[in-house]
Amino acid sequence: MRVNLVDIVYGLESQSEDHLFYVNRHSGEMIHAVNKFLHMAKSDEVQKQMENWEMKELRLAKKILRDSNDYILLPQMPAIQKVMIRFTETVEDIERQKALLETIQASATFKPFRSLLKMYGLLDDWYGFREEIYIGIARDFCEKHELNYQELE
């Protein structure tokens, strides 16, 4: 069994407070679980008139909790602002670096930072840098949990 790093990176990028991603330790499969159903499964709460898809989600949540040694929760991603700052530190032009840092400090959103990257012709560099960060986190996760993984090609 090999875990696909692309799947882990997708899970890392997609994970949120409400949507969690697990790796099945035996199959390498990425499992998406909705936090609401995990809470319901913990309390054995069943709502009346649940839709079929909701019952399916609840069964999955119960399985994850019941077989907790088989499912490994992906780690939380670092805050995007931290990754943006780390990228900015790699920019050699000091004026551009300063402008990027000021943009990060002035706005908690990605859009102004992206606009500046685009203006400076650094957008592809940013996406490559961010991907390497995510791939590194995915590799570290696999190694920590002794999962064989398939390198990106």
Image (cartoon, grey):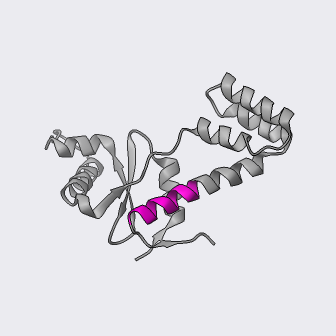
Relative horizontal placement of residue 5, taking residue 92 as reference (left or right):
left
Tell me the residue at 65%/34% (across/down). Answer: 110
Residue 151, x across and y down, in percent: 56, 71
Magenta span has 31? no
Residue 47, x across and y down, in percent: 17, 39
Tell me the residue at 79%/43% (across/down). Answer: 91
- Viewer-nearest residue: 97 or 25: 97
- Viewer-nearest residue: 144 or 11: 144
Tell me the residue at 76%/51% (across/down). Answer: 124
* 149 versus 43 height, above or below: below
* 82 versus 144 height, above or below: above
Q: How many marks?
A: 0
Residue 44, x across and y down, in percent: 13, 44
Which quarter of the rendering shows the C terminus? bottom right
Relative horizontal placement of residue 55, taking residue 6 as reference (left or right):
left
Q: Main secondary structure of the magenta part?
A: helix
In the figure, residue 70 lies in which quadrant? bottom left
Tell me the residue at 44%/42% (across/down). Answer: 16
Q: Which residues are magenta?
A: 134-145
Q: As drawn, which residue projects farthest toward the left?
A: 44
- Viewer-nearest residue: 71 or 29: 71
Q: As drawn, which residue projects farthest toward the bottom?
A: 1
Residue 140, x across and y down, in percent: 49, 60
* 148 versus 104 height, above or below: below
Relative horizontal placement of residue 9, taking residue 38 as reference (left or right):
right
- Viewer-nearest residue: 93 or 129: 93
* 104 versus 33 height, above or below: above
Which quarter of the rendering shows the N terminus? bottom left
Q: As drawn, which residue projects farthest toward the top?
A: 106
